[in-house]
């Protein structure tokens, strides 16, 4: 992931035409044999190159933007790109503080002349209700949880998941209300009660439920969510979107990553060049205020 | 309370929010107690509607900062059993986005919960979906209008009303997410398309709480001043006076657009609001209201 700029410079500037030809012949991913007798650039691989070269740029931009604008742009892009990206909306709505989310909503007004909720209404899928509710939240952030209510609400969720039609979960009004309006402390208490009462893990019970699982993880156990995203990014067969998540998570969560003791070893071996330096430095500086 | 009520009214009635805060501060320094807590204790335990309670309530409402006051009004409404005044609809539909936000913050500070979770907890069904959506709204503040969209959403509203599907997703979505400017355009398109205003097509004295709330939401969003004029008119006319509503409108709009609402009232009823209040109320409560009206 990324580009080893130094090596590229030394190889290319020191290569004569003959050497470059053998380079091209050796890169079957980038070049194909043209019938007219030359090694032709494979158009589709331009994209791959673009992605790799742009990683550093994206990291810079993401890092420099005001967090409100950054989050507003992340959300807008996710809405535009479709269902596979909705987890980004959940991520932003659920892992930022109430005031940070509010700031993102304000920035969204300035940038796109609409509220996030308005743009979300153009989503056709069943995720819409949940997403609108999540971005509209202005959760209480103080302490003080009513354990009885948390317990009874964990029961509501349990029944919704295990007794009802799992496919209809996204339409389950009570479940959505609980997830979208309760404070994070309350939801974490709910999470505990769920485990205690039913000997099951709420997030695991939502396995396969896409953004519902993401929602619960982001609200109750964000470090689990982020670890999962980072591991998916550095996997052997990771796709482009998973890799992009690396930049996003490291840049937006660096303080958390330091706190969680995220060890950069995993990414050290996989990243290249300036992009690698940027990412490692981000993590290292994560506890600088 | 006794003889100091007139002084309280004279002192507080003509002060703006910043000045009232200074007064509270000064009171605390001199008397070593929180003026608001003192007023709260005057209120609790009083269930007979004596003039003292009404005036205390009015003063209490007046002395709080506007966002705090609305948070209190919302909380009182939620905890009320029986006949609701749909104050929460009124609050969420007549305030601008920043004001609504301030109310949500004030609610956090005062009640250690978010407004939306309390609303979600105390309501259900269509009512819940509408109310949570309305209090959670953070509308775009711009004046831009998309006419094509307004036309199509006016149609959607018409379809829903025609089929009596008042609680359908489109209705709630349009009313709770669109900017005020866009909503006004939509209401205008509705009128052009259907020949009557949308409020006329919503059943008036419905026993269905949800429909009553929906109608109120539409009226508030469409023309807040007209809405408040009507609340005032209703609170005064007929048998007895609805002091709660009267106090609420005068106190909450005193620093906003009470002047225009007064003008509207005069036009509509051929008598100035001051005169009507003078006639229908008495004692220190009357003094309080008249002072606020004179502001």
Image (cartoon, coloured by chain):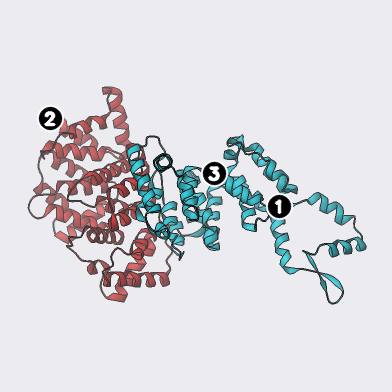
Q: What residue is drawn where x is 46% and y is 50%?
A: A205
Query: Which chain contains the residue that carries disc 2?
Result: B
User: Is the residue marked by circle 3 packed among few (<14), some (14-19), or many (20+) residues within 10 Å?
Assistant: few
Q: Nearer the viewer, residue A282 or B96?
A: A282
Please name the residue that numbered disc 1 is placed on: A1
Q: Nearer the viewer, residue A172 or B57?
A: A172
Discs 2 and 1 lie in a common subunit? no
Mark with earlier residue (3, 1): 1
Element at badge 2?
helix
User: Is the residue marked by circle 2 packed among few (<14), some (14-19), or many (20+) residues within 10 Å?
Assistant: few
Please name the residue that numbered disc 2 is placed on: B2
Q: Which chain is red?
A: B
Discs 2 and 3 lie in a common subunit? no
Q: Quadrant of residue B18?
A: top left
Q: Looking at the image, do the residues carrying marks 2 and 3 touch, with CB atoms under 8 Å apart?
A: no
Q: Is residue A133 visible?
A: yes
Compared across the picture, whether A6 is left or right of B208 comes to right
Which disc, if any, is residue B165?
none
Q: Can residue A247 be seen in this view?
A: no
What colour is chain A? cyan
Query: Which chain contains the residue that carries disc 3?
Result: A
Element at badge 3?
helix
Q: What residue is drawn where x is 57% and y is 46%?
A: A226
Which of pointers 2 and 1 indicates the residue nearer the eye?
1
Compared across the picture, whether A46 is left or right of B38 comes to right
Compared across the picture, whether A221 is left or right of B221 comes to right
| Residue B109 rendering spot, x and y as whole percentages | 36, 37
Element at badge 1?
loop
Which disc, if any, is residue A224?
3
**Callout count:** 3
């Amino acid at each position: 992931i990324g580009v080893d700029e130094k090596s590229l410079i030394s190889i290319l500037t020191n290569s004569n035409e003959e050497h470059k030809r053998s380079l091209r012949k050796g890169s079957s991913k980038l070049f194909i044999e043209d019938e007219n007798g030359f090694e032709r650039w494979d158009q589709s691989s331009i994209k791959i190159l673009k992605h790799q070269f742009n990683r550093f740029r994206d990291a810079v931009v993401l890092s420099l933007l005001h967090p409100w604008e950054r989050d507003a742009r992340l959300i807008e892009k996710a809405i535009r790109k479709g269902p596979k990206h909705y987890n980004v909306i959940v991520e932003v709505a659920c892992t930022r503080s109430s005031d940070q989310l509010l700031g993102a909503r304000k920035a969204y007004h300035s940038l796109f002349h609409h509220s996030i909720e308005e743009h979300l209404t153009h989503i056709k899928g069943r995720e819409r209700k949940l997403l609108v509710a999540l971005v509209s939240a202005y959760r209480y952030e103080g302490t003080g949880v009513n354990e009885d209510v948390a317990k009874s609400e964990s029961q509501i969720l349990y029944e919704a998941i295990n007794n009802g039609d799992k496919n209809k979960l996204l339409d389950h009004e009570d479940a959505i209300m609980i997830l979208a309006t309760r404070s994070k402390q309350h939801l974490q208490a709910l999470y505990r009660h769920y485990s205690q009462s039913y000997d099951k893990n709420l997030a695991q019970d939502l396995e396969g439920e896409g953004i519902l699982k993401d929602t619960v993880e982001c609200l109750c156990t964000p470090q689990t969510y982020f670890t999962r995203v980072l591991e998916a990014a550095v996997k052997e067969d990771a796709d482009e979107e998973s890799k992009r998540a690396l930049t996003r998570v490291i840049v937006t969560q660096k303080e958390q990553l330091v706190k969680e003791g995220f060890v950069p070893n995993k990414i050290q071996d996989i990243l290249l060049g300036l992009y690698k330096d940027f990412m490692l430095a981000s993590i290292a500086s994560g506890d600088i205020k | 309370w006794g003889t100091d009520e007139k002084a309280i009214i004279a002192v507080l009635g003509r002060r703006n929010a910043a000045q009232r805060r200074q007064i509270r501060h000064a009171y605390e320094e001199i008397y070593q107690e929180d003026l608001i807590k003192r007023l709260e204790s005057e209120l609790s335990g009083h269930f007979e509607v004596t003039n003292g309670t009404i005036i205390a309530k009015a003063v209490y409402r007046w002395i709080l900062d506007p966002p705090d006051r609305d948070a209190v009004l919302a909380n009182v409404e939620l905890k009320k059993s029986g006949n609701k005044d749909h104050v929460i609809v009124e609050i969420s539909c007549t305030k601008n986005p920043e004001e609504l936000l301030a109310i949500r913050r004030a609610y956090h500070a005062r009640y250690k919960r978010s407004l939306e979770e309390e609303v979600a907890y105390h309501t259900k069904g269509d009512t819940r979906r509408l109310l949570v959506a309305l209090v959670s709204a953070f509308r775009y503040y711009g004046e831009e209008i998309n006419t094509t969209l307004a036309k199509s959403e006016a149609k959607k509203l018409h379809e829903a009303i025609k089929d009596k599907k008042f609680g359908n997703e489109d209705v709630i979505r349009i009313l709770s997410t669109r900017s005020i400017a866009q909503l006004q355009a939509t209401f205008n398109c509705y009128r052009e398309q259907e020949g009557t205003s949308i409020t006329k097509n919503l059943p008036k004295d419905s026993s269905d709480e949800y429909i009553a709330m929906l109608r109120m939401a539409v009226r508030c969003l469409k023309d807040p001043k007209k809405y408040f004029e009507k609340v005032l008119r209703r609170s005064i006319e007929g048998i007895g006076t609805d002091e709660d509503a009267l106090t609420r409108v005068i106190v909450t709009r005193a620093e906003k657009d009470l002047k225009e609402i007064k003008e509207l009232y005069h036009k509509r009823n051929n008598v100035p609001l001051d005169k009507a209040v003078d006639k229908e109320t008495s004692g220190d409560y009357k003094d309080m209201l008249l002072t606020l009206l004179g502001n």
